[in-house]
Amino acid sequence: MDLSVLNLQQLEAVLHKDGPLLVFAGAGSGKTRVITYRIANLIHTHGVSPRHILAVTFTNKAANEMKERLRHLLGDAARGLWVGTFHSICLRILRESGTAIGIPPNFVVYDESDQLEVVRQALIALNIDEKQFNARTIANQISRAKERLLTPEQYQERAIDFFERIVASVYRNYQAFLRSANALDFDDLLVRTIELLETQPLIRARYQDQFRYILVDEYQDVNYAQYVLVRLLAENHRNLCVVGDDDQAIYSFRGAEVELILRFEQDFPDAKVVKLERNYRSTQPILDAAHKVIQENTLRAPKKLWTERTDGAPITFTQAIDQEDEARIVADYIFQQVRQGKRRFKDFAVLYRTNAQSRAFEERFLRERIPYRLVGALRFYDRREIKDLLAYLRVVVNPDDSVSLKRIINVPPRQIGQSTLNAVQAHAAEWGISLYQALNDPRLLGTFTPKTLQAVQQFVLLIEELREFARTHSLTATVKRLLESSGYLAWLEQKGDADSLDRAGNLREFVTVVEGFERKLQDEEETPEDTLNAFLQHIALLSDIDTLDESRDQVVMMTFHAAKGLEFPVVFLVGLEQGIIPHALSETPRDIEEERRLLYVGMTRAMDELHLLCARERSVYGSRKAAIPSPFLRALADTPMPSLFQLRYGGAKPSPLQWTPPHRRQEPPKPAPEKPAPFLPGQRVHHPQHGYGIVVRTQEHVVTVMFPGGKGLMSFPLQGCPLEEA
């Protein structure tokens, strides 16, 4: 292991052995190298057993990269090390020890779509109209409650308005449904692990003794539940190393609290603090511009990145006419660079604040035949036929998973219609049993016609045969048997239309995915059932970034949030306008600082070139409105920034940023009202796109409206509010 590849600050963090350690790792400063070398040094130099080391990351991509680097540094000496995301680590602990708090090891993990389905089931059970209370909004509220470790009862006690009381009722039913299905959602993985450690002293002592050295990456993104979990595991040996960058804390909407990394020295007064400020990614002009932006935040630890790449292309700032012109400018520059052989398509990334901004770029790239990849679009594992196949596998593992069973009970069609399913659901609810148990209950079976009874019994027989087959055969063989015996693949092939054949192709590709997964586990001594469980766990915890194929020669388009942790030679930050970044709903100083960090994250993705763009006009709700450059760009007022046009063709010196929009058609600007008109709770209002709604809450700068038709709650800034009194 060659420590000479580390700089002085990296070496300081790597060689620190015992006691708490806080590493402020700036963008591109080599934090993954520090974590892997620190682990390798503990094992190689100090003889720490790999089983006594826990490394926690935020993405599977980061975990896999860390494992690969450790394998390169240590070879087989790294076997036994625990490396994974918070969710995967907790899932593993619960599989091992969850029976102590009533969690059987064959529980399933519900993804976001499953959670929404359970919320909808709860709304139906409570006789609440989903058109009035949006299921996704309620699911998000339940997730926030779990991140604060609030039980349904505690949430009920704290509910202060009608909406929160509705959420409390749904939350209680939601948890009951999960228990009956032997299922946990993502938040439960942490919540139940914390419950396990807090209520079972022997189990807590076991894992505290096992994890004598704990390393947590991206610590600025931890939420309260994750913070509590880390403190629980580390409280005995206190050898906790956290690595993060408060300037890149951008996930408060997921419950992350940037204050937790900034208070680490209060939690551990004896902590050693190391700052990694040397950047290995970007040029100095990019770093200088990013620093000018971020230093205006007050809630941050002082630091400034530097690099030996002192020269570099100037940052550009271009004001387009509108979003279509903005897309044209970007496409022209990409096309020119590729045509001249200076770049490949995969060298470029287009980053934006909201997904809706991708539309103009998609249309332009299609027109110009520029290949692109949209991160956040429909993933392979989100396609209907793949989710069907995964549902079959989850029922094979856990027949009481009623959400998955409901999905596949009549797929492909097997004469179990909606009326039969309704009868099964009603019977299950009446007797407090799962759908699968209801399908085996003579009290229900006796009510079916011979034709329906035969269809139900054949389905149950199919599941039981697959369960038996899976116990003694490989995962690949089980999937092939499932496709054959269920008739799903033959059904799609017989339909013969282009869409069905494409879906059949996706099912065959799934077999390839499974084969690849089994190859990776070939050295593990896993039973067939363990392998199936591990595969479902792997799929449940995948994210969009985990499926990003960086080898494909395509321009990448994604949000600032999705770009976190990635890097690209050339980066375009588009739509840098007031109301977009900072977002119109960001009203508090804390919100504004997070929006500024979001821009900083986007800027520091760039390796060689950084191009900033905004539009002078932008279509909003079908009408064109003048746009103003983001106020965050004022920090760059003294930075010479040519436009992309000037960069390509030369011309006049860069002009200063314009902070007032140009007049359109010489119309005098309308004076802004001194104070936005207030809206009162219960007032009926009209929105040009969403129609009529009822005001449910008015705050200092924001009004919240409930819209019917499944649209649910929406919030609007009072300044420039599109709502009108009805």
Image: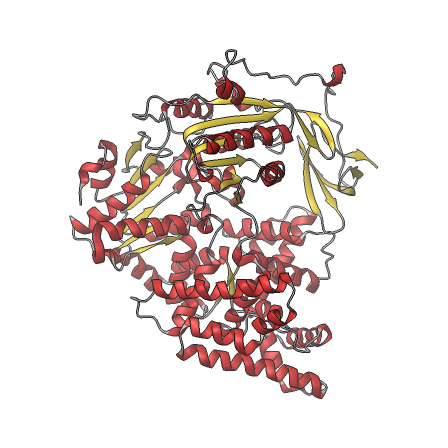
Q: Is residue 195 left or right of residue 380?
A: left
Front residue of 55 and 163: 55
Front residue of 469 and 185: 469
The quarter of the picture where residue 533 lies is bottom left
Considering the image in quadrants, where does the C terminus appear? top right
The quarter of the picture where residue 445 lies is bottom right
Q: Is residue 448 left or right of residue 111?
A: right
Considering the image in quadrants, where does the N terminus appear? top left
Across and down, in percent, residue 18 comes to: 22, 44
Residue 440 visible in this rendered orientation of the protein: no
Across and down, in percent, residue 130 comes to: 71, 55
Compared to residue 200, the image places residue 637 above or below, namely: above
Number of callouts: 0
Which residue is at 36% across, 51% downward?
63
Which residue is at 48% across, 72% downward?
479
Compared to residue 318, the image places residue 139 above or below, namely: below
The quarter of the picture where residue 31 lies is top left
Residue that extends furthest to the front in the rendered view of this protein = 340
Which residue is at 55% across, 26% downward?
613
Across and down, in percent, residue 596 comes to: 50, 29
Residue 376 visible in this rendered orientation of the protein: yes
Compared to residue 412, the image places residue 55 above or below, namely: above
